[in-house]
Image (tube, rainbow, N blue to C red):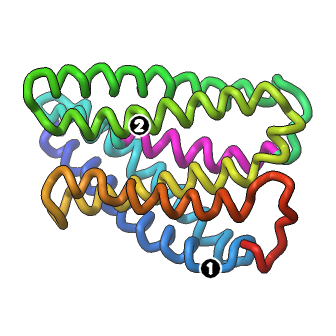
Amino acid sequence: MDYATLFKIFITLHAVGGFISLISGTISVIARKGNVWHKKSGMIFYYGMLTAGISGIVASLLPDHNNPFLFVVGLFSVYLVLSGYRALRFKSVRKMADLRWDKVISWSMAIIGVGMLAYGGYLLYYGLTIGWVLLVFGTIGLLNAINDLRAMRDLKLLRKKHLRLHIAKISGAYIAAFTAFFVTNSVLPSLLSWLLPSVFGIIFISYWMRKTRLGKKITAETV
């Protein structure tokens, strides 16, 4: 099997996983948080995003098909959906050893985020405006990773913050799915397709962070 055929297979998996993620993610957003529809669509979204992210990374690394942006978006999506899913476990974590893989995930994102910032600056230096995309996503990834690592220092606080971390990460993964859809289908001019979903996503996440702020009692009606 040649590389062109392999690329077609993985890019098809990437597209299918992304499409499934968009549909299931939308259902999860609309459904009442915590009910059956939210949980089932959320799990489908999780596996859809993993499929899209991993297949995108593989496709971007194949000889003659190198695509650094597909690679970065794939890594970013996998980080968000993995850390967001694992955040639900934090409500019952009792010892630091239980967080070893979560720390690996967060440190990996921190390193990748620094790399994205450096490469974005390099592209801007040579007059390529797409460098702004890497600067924005690199900053978001790095700040998320730093926030994760700080939260993991205090297990008691981590248990309290598990829902907020889950919402922020999974919402970020949902935004990444929409961004990929906008960019792939040229819904808007290039730079707007990359950045506009993030603007709306930040507003959406901020709304839910206020609704689930620490010290506020969370009820079925709240979420």
Q: Residue at x 84, y 72 (%)?
A: 219
Residue 185 within the segment the image draws in magenta: no
Secondary structure found at label 1 = loop
Q: Amino acid at mark 1?
A: Ala
- What residue is shown at x 13% (from left), y 58% (from top)? 189
Q: Residues within 10 Å of mark 1 (few under 14, many from 20)?
A: some
Question: Which is nearer the N-term, disc 2 or disc 1?
Answer: 1
Q: Which residues are magenta?
A: 74-90
Numbered mark located on residue 75 in the image = 2
Inspect the image, locate mark 2, and give the three-letter code of the amino acid beneath it. Answer: Leu
- Where is residue 212? Give x, y as percent: 74, 60
State the residue at coordinates (34%, 62%): 16
Q: Give the answer, above or below, for where 14 lies relative to 86.
A: below
The residues tagged by marks 2 and 1 sit, at their Cα atoms, a distance apart of 28 Å
Residue 27, position in %: x, y?
Answer: 53, 77
Residue 75 colored in magenta in the image? yes
Mark 1 = which residue? 31
In screen coordinates, is 147 left or right of 123? Answer: right
The quarter of the rendered structure image containing the C terminus is bottom right
Q: Position of residue 64 (x, y in %)?
A: 11, 31
Q: Which mark is residue 174?
A: none
Q: Are marks 2 and 1 in contact (CB under 8 Å)?
A: no
Most frequent secondary structure within the magenta stretch: helix
- Assess disc 2: are there few (<14), some (14-19) or many (≥20) residues with their C-alpha within 10 Å of its C-alpha: some
Residue shown at 26%/23% (left/top)?
A: 119
Q: Position of residue 188 (x, y in %)?
A: 17, 64
